[in-house]
Amino acid sequence: MNRVFFAGSGSEANDTNIRMVRRYWDIMGQPEKRIIIARKNGYHGSTIGGGSLGGMSGIHKHGGLLSGIVHIGQPDWWSEGGDHTPEAFGLARAQELEAMIKQLGVENVAAFIGEPVQGAGGVIVPPATYWPEIQRICDKYGILLIADEVITGFGRTGNWFGSETFGIRPHIMTIAKGLSSGYQPIGGSIVHDSVAEVLASDEFNHGYTYSGHPVAAAVALENLRIIQEDGLIEHVRNVAHPYLKERWDALTDHPMVGEAKLVGLMGSIALTPNKATRAKFASEAGTVGYRTRERCFANDLIMRHVGDRMIISPPLVITPAEIDILIERAKKSLDESYASLKADGLFVAA
Ligand SMILES: Cc1ncc(COP(=O)(O)O)c(C=O)c1O
C-alpha cells in the first residue's frame, strides 16, 4: 500500500473512497459496479458521503442518504447477539455480507467498508470470527475492501493499523486523527498498488485544494517520527494495554457493568441492570449512560457514553500510574451513578 490520496479529514477521505472505488470499476470495464455495502451503526464521517456510508439513522435523518449505499447488521454481540455464542454471532453477521452481495448481484457491488473496531458506535469489538469471514467473502466475490482506520490507525490498537490487529487485507484504508495526533487537520486514503495502478492508468477528476497541505503534512511527518522514535506503539502493546486490560476487565465486578472490552487503548463497558440476561434499562436508551458520563466529567475523567455504553480512548503515552488514576475515577463515577440510579428507581430492566 504505497500510495496516499490526501484529504483534510476522515470524512473527506471517505468521500474520496466512494469516488475512487466507482472509478476503479469504470476503468475495469464494469461501470455498473457502484454499490457500497456498509454497516448499521458504523461511523464514517459527516459529509454526505461519509454520513451515508455510516449507518446512523440520526445522521441519515438530517440531510439524507446517498443512493448506492446499503447497510448490513453490525457485529455487536452484547446488544444483538441473542442466544448465539459470540463466535456464532460474528459468523452470522459477516455472512449477511454474502447474502447482500447475492441479493444485489455481485455485478452491481463495488466495495465493502467497515471500521476494524466501531468507534463512535460504542467501541464495538467484533467477535474473533467476524473479520476472517468478511475477508473470505470479499476475496470470494472480488469486491474491494475498505478499512476505515480513522480511529484504529497509528497505534490505537497496539499495531500501526487495526487491519494488522485483526488480520484484514484492505484495498483502501481511510486515515485521519492519529496521522497528526490531531494537531493539524489531515486525512487520506492509503491505496493498494493493485487499485492505485488502475486509477493512475486514466484520468481521475478528483482533488481538494488542501490535499497534502504542506503545514499539515510537516506536522504529520513530525508526529510519525515521534510515534516511531519514542516507541509509542510498543508502549501501547507491551505496557499500557496489558496493564489497563487487567484493570479494565475487573470493572465487570461492578454491579452495573456487564462486559468490558479493550483493544489496544480503545475500550468500552456495557451498563446493564442484569448481567446474566444482558438486559437493557427500562429508561430511554442513553439515560443511564448520560447520567454516568456526568459523574465521570465531575470526577475529571473523560469517559463518554454511546447509549448506555461507556467508552474511553486515552492518550497513547498513558503510564501505569495514570491508568490507576483512570480506574479509580471510573470506579468512583460508576459507584455514584449506581447509587443515584437506585435512589431514583432507574436501576430497572426493560
Ligand atoms: C471511523 C471514522 N471514520 C471517519 C471519521 C470522520 O473523520 P473526521 O471527523 O475527521 O471527518 C471518524 C471520526 O470520528 C471516524 O471515527
Image (tube, rainbow, N blue to C red):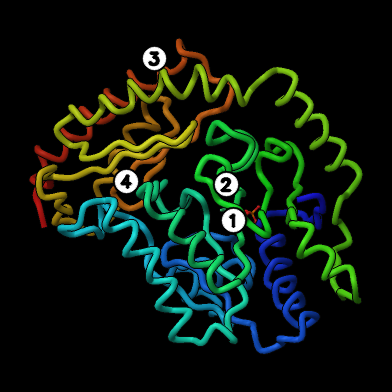
Q: Residue at x 76, y 48 (%)?
A: 186
Q: Which residue is mark 2?
A: 163
Task: Bin the neighbour count of mark 2 within 10 Å (Cα to Cα): few under 14, some 14-19, many 20 and up.
Answer: many
**Depth check, front residue: 103 or 222:** 103
Question: Marks 1 and 3, how far apart in space?
Answer: 33 Å
Q: Residue at x 63, y 23 (%)?
A: 232
Kind of residue indicated by mark 2: Ser
Residue 208 position in % (x across, y down): 85, 63
Q: Which residue is mark 4?
A: 309
Single out the mark in the foreground, 3 or 2: 2
Single out the mark in the foreground, 4 or 1: 1
Query: Any mark on residue 147, and which?
Result: 1
Question: Marks 2 and 1, how far apart in space?
Answer: 7 Å
Q: Earlier in the sequence, mark 2 or mark 1?
A: 1
Q: Residue at x 21, y 52 (%)?
A: 85
Query: Any mark on residue 324, and which?
Result: 3
Task: Bin the neighbour count of mark 3 within 10 Å (Cα to Cα): few under 14, some 14-19, many 20 and up.
Answer: some
Kind of residue indicated by mark 1: Ala
Q: Residue at x 10, y 52 (%)?
A: 349
Q: Quadrant of ligand 1?
A: bottom right
Does 143 sit above or below residue 127? below
Question: Marks 3 and 4, how far apart in space?
Answer: 21 Å
Does 237 sit above or below residue 148? above
Label 3 element class: helix
Question: Marks 4 and 1, how far apart in space?
Answer: 24 Å
Q: Are marks 4 and 2 in contact (CB under 8 Å)?
A: no
Quarter the C terminus occupies: bottom left
Counting every numbered tag in the picture gives 4
Residue 337 position in % (x across, y down): 22, 34
**Which of the 4 quarters of the picture holds residue 335?**
top left
Question: Marks 4 and 2, how far apart in space?
Answer: 24 Å
